[in-house]
Amino acid sequence: MTEPRHRPTGQARSALLIALTGLRRSVRSRAFIITTVVGPILLAGIISLAFGGGSDFQATIGIVDEDGSAMTEGFVTALTGADMGGLEVERVDSVDAARTQVDDDDLSAAIVLPAGFGASARSAAPADVEVLTASDRGVGGEVARSIAGQLTDRVNAARLAVATASATGAPLPDEDELAAIELPVTVEATGSGGDTSPAAYFGPSMGLLFLFLSIGTIARQLLEEKRNGLLDRLRSGPLSDGALLAGNGLTVLVIGASSLSVIWLATTVAMGADWGDPVGVALLIAAAAVAVAGLAGFIAAVATTEQAADTLATVLAFVFAIVGGAFIPLGDMPEALQRLALLTPTGLALRGFAELSVGEAGALDVAPYAFALVAIGLVAGTIAARLLPRRLGAT
Amino acid sequence: MTDAATAEAITRSDAPAVLACRGLRKTYGERMAVDDVGFAIAPGETYGLIGPNGAGKTTTISMVCGLLTRDAGEVTVAGRPMGPGATEAKGAIGLVPQEVALYDELSGEENLRFFGRLQGLPRKDVAARVAEVLELVGLADRARDHVGEYSGGMKRRANIAAGLLHRPRLLVLDEPTVGVDPQSRNAILESVEVLGGEGMSVLYTTHYMEEAERLCDRIGILDEGRLIAEGTRRELIARLGVGDRVDVSGTGDLAGFAEACAALPGVRGADTREGTVAVGVTDGGAALAGIVAAAEHTGVAITGIHLVEPDLEDVFLGLTGKALRD
């Protein structure tokens, strides 16, 4: 019998071997490639188209002035003369004409300033503005509602000022003074950045959704390997549990980072998306991958069966996606939900990506989000490292 | 198995035992899965651990291989203490799990390269060793096919190959033939015989008596977590004291023939059943001549005669009062 010729294997080298083999297996799995790369890109493309298609937002909104007061005239003049990027506001003579143009798709939406709107600033009745839009006219309608909201806010603020003056005996502002109300109308696709493209938002959002969904597969694989003796075979060799976990964690980390990087490249090249500062994007991608790896380990550690791992990952992925703003840009969410979103890894990553894609933020600006993501990954990974050996049968 | 018996087994061989375990104990909640189990395996010895499903074979193996922490007891492999973190002791073991523990997405060759490298084989030696092992299990011509495309029997053979790569001092096979077709089963048994012949120590668990009888130098019988007997096949049968049985078929006065047989020296008893007389004897070979003479004396024309030796199934039945496959 020949004596064994093996030599002790470095644990770091073993972890690397496990990671490389895991990657090789993943690359050969068609289902895995669809889940982590093809699916997110397709979905991001579809949603981006639904939200306006390309990187340049274009919409024409009509405005009907039925009041004819100095105040509303001022508003109309300001809006029709303002430079608002891809948004154009044009005066329409009547509500009927506006409705026809909206129905004919000549206008994305129309704002109707009703008779008495200007006078409402001096009365107790609140101001109200009507917005005409078609149910399938996504972003244009939303922008029109946003402008209408800002107009009514301004008038209501003026009404409050008049009421206060009246109550305190101060002189009431006259119509000209009210007409001079500053009109701070801005057009921002808030949350996804000032002039960000939908693809730059939905690329990472869908990538994160699918990555969190894929952690169920990863956790299930680990439990499957426990069931079919593969883990026993690995653990019966000169390999520590730490190296085994590190190897698997590294696999997930590289898969996560690669998946988001491919989506970044694809949405940039094919959809003209601008994710922003590349260093910042790379930082966030790496941090998100750490979070995904940690959570994958956590799910493998707490799930008792392969089905439980799948279910848990699916629930987690959708909760993160819905609360974190993967389907609705964070800026369009109520403020409370925006704060809640930052408790999820998806929300943290998307906030960072959104800030980068606006074009003003850099790596340093998104570093807090990256740190938070890494912290989530490390906490989840530490829990997994403590629980998994027990789950794998070491006790 | 007592510690004294373990020590005796070790001293039977001149070389130190490749595997020595004593006092192994493992409980799951209230259930005692393994209770005070100890045995040793000498270099080149094939040791069979037999018992019905749930007897504690896999739990024992898991503790031997350092996959499971022990509640009590000691394990040394190639002189090194074994435990979950004992990488040196683990390097001396090649485990072949009961299920096919290979990656379906990788080829047979890729799987073996991976496990070989993980076991610490130098990169330059891996390819040659993988080819050698694939040849041994008869899979050289399918080396580049994905394991997922292998038949059940081929997967089992590849499964064994993965445990052999680093030339372990101790090969541990956990029920390697469960659910395998007869042809593949025979190929697996032949491979184990070859390895045993080459001097590798083997720990083989099974609930198929015929496999243990064919392969194992010594056998330990596990039941309900306890090692209730250990020894060579002959020793176990002798311990049971049931002897052989001679079945004689014939025509004539079978009742008178049975009575004449019962009076012969070395005969424990004789019974007539459906045209056959079953004669219980201490030594079948020695009793045959007397039985044939008794037939002639009582005028019985013999149409068939069979010597039946007791097997491990009988031993297990005798020791536990239940069949092994219950």
Image (cartoon, coloured by chain):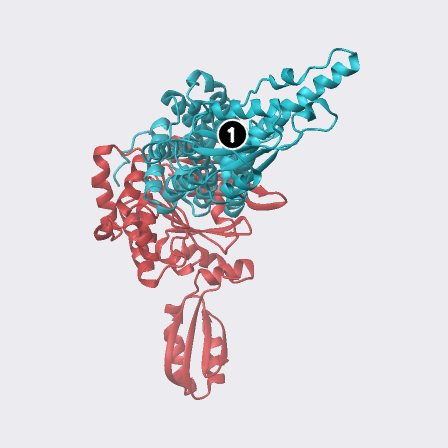
Chain colours: A cyan, B red
**A337 to the left or right of B61:** right
Q: Quadrant of residue B308?
A: bottom left
Label 1 sits on what residue type?
Answer: Pro
Q: Quadrant of residue A64?
A: top right
Q: Residue furthest top?
A: A170
Q: Quadrant of the N terminus of chain A?
A: top left
Q: Position of residue A268 (x, y in %)?
A: 34, 31
Q: Position of residue A145 (x, y in %)?
A: 57, 33
Residue at the (41%, 53%) spot, across then down: B175
Q: Position of residue B275 (x, y in %)?
A: 45, 84
Give whichever of B263, B102 is nearer the camera.
B102
Q: Position of residue A168 (x, y in %)?
A: 78, 12
**A212 to the left or right of B92:** right
Give whichever of B28, B107 is nearer the camera.
B107
Q: What residue is pinned by disc 1?
A: A345
Callout 1: chain: A
On the question of residue B250 being in view, the answer is yes
Which secondary structure, mark 1?
Answer: helix
Give whichever of A163, B36 is nearer the camera.
A163
Crowding at mark 1 (Cα within 10 Å: few <14, some 14-19, many 20+): many
Q: Residue A319, relative to residue B33: is it above or below?
A: above
